[in-house]
Image: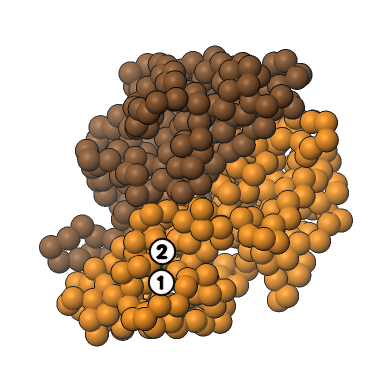
Chain colours: A brown, B orange
Amino acid sequence: MSGSVTVIGLGPGDPRYLTPAAQAALDAAQDLIGYFPYVARVSERPGLTRHASDNRVEVDRARHALELAAAGRRVAVVSGGDPGVFAMAAAVFEALEAGDPAWRALSITVEPGITAMLAAAARIGAPLGGDFCALSLSDNLKPWEVITARLEAVLTADLVIALYNPISRARPWQLGAALALAAEHRAPETPVIFARAVGRPDEAIRILTLAEAREASADMATLVMIGASATRLIPREGAAPFVYTPRSVAR
Amino acid sequence: MSGSVTVIGLGPGDPRYLTPAAQAALDAAQDLIGYFPYVARVSERPGLTRHASDNRVEVDRARHALELAAAGRRVAVVSGGDPGVFAMAAAVFEALEAGDPAWRALSITVEPGITAMLAAAARIGAPLGGDFCALSLSDNLKPWEVITARLEAVLTADLVIALYNPISRARPWQLGAALALAAEHRAPETPVIFARAVGRPDEAIRILTLAEAREASADMATLVMIGASATRLIPREGAAPFVYTPRSVAR
């Protein structure tokens, strides 16, 4: 089979964070598949067919990409951030595993990108300076009991926690419940970051305490980071504080 | 103060993974500070003073960067991968917090990069497709008891685990101990990835089972990823299998 699928991470939004490897893969594509705001980030050009789709149809989208590739097309599947972090790469491999065995002979590659937690961390200091984890708060794909058990574990283990998919119209209460759980393990003054649309013109980053975060609002474009017990602020005059987590844990 | 420090992520090594923002920051620098193999990745040019140093002197290096910036220089501190993930960014903020309060008026920014676990994951499929964590296995900066408690927690919570700094000449047995602990929680056939020098000419990626990994050797340049219970292989004829973790957890 001569077709290919490349799953591409577009990074946080600003093209200055798109890697040259990802740009080259976009330039080589004949078909572009993805959630419509990500497809919209890639300029139209002759020879590129754009297939934008709605959210929450990831496996349909992945299957479509594999079908086009099986027909000989060079297909790019785009995700914001990194495609391997709560994005399209896993969906493509799910579709590959369940689909036509002949698809396994296709060229399938992944181009990494700057995922939201790295972009948000860089903006404010080094909050991920110690051990950390990335959890999706969406209970569309896993039971809420699994999510709370994982949160309990990483709170007890004192990891910094990056929460992806913290909230949506269909999931309005989960973030509040997660922060309430955090408050059982961490002090009210623990730094919590709400990083919205990092690297895009409407970027808004709020450095809150855990107590404040429990009263604050977030949306689908927000990444939430809950500090570990050692995560701290460095105040500055006339500027937002830096937030960082020391590399060391005291003996 | 007119000087600045930019902490720059060089990504995994191949310049095709260096972001344009990071490249622009390198181009603007007057002084370049970092561990010598990272400094060596940046071409010499007139007007750029290179200060390469040995490993394990991160805070000295960070203080030096801040002193140069306080003297009015535009300083770039370079790390492999992402500077916020077990690299120089936290060291710079540690030095800033402990240092001359006047340093807080300096311009200090961080340019994110593709960290090793994202680069390694992209090479083999989508092993980080579910919830995951990043732990440093080095007990230079935290007690071994903290490391094992964290490992126990994330193994029990069934996260995919990326282990940074798995081994060094001074820490020969820690990786074996971590994999022995993993074997108490996960099946012997659980995929374990040893990803060495990803994105560099000597790249070598091994897809092992947990049982095989316990007998395999690694070195300082290796990132180790331990799959979750759902992490699986997609076999291919005449090529390495893909490795991925489904997005869903069964109800």
Q: Are marks 1 and 2 on the same chain?
A: yes
**Label 1 crowd bin: few (<14), some (14–19), many (20+), radius 10 Å:** many
Q: Position of residue B189 (x, y in %)?
A: 83, 38
Q: Position of residue B33 (x, y in %)?
A: 43, 77
Q: Which residue is mark 1?
A: B77
**Residue at x 49%, y 23% (from the top left corner):** A31
Secondary structure beneath disc 1?
A: strand
**Label 2 crowd bin: few (<14), some (14–19), many (20+), radius 10 Å:** many
> In this view of the protein, can residue A64 be seen by the observer?
yes
> In this view of the protein, can residue A186 be seen by the observer?
no
Amino acid under disc 2: Ile
| Residue A174 tag number | none
Residue extending furthest front? Answer: A46
Q: Which residue is mark 2?
A: B8
| Number of marks | 2
Q: Quadrant of residue A142?
A: top right
The numbered mark 2 sits on a residue in which chain?
B
Q: From the viewer's side, name the closer residue of B105 and A148.
A: B105
Q: Position of residue B116 (x, y in %)?
A: 58, 54
Q: Quadrant of residue B89?
A: bottom left
Contact between marks 1 and 2 (CB within 8 A): the answer is yes
Q: Position of residue A7 (x, y in %)?
A: 54, 33
Q: In this image, B141 relative to A198: left or right?
A: right
For the N terminus of chain B, the image quarter is bottom left
Secondary structure beneath disc 2?
A: strand
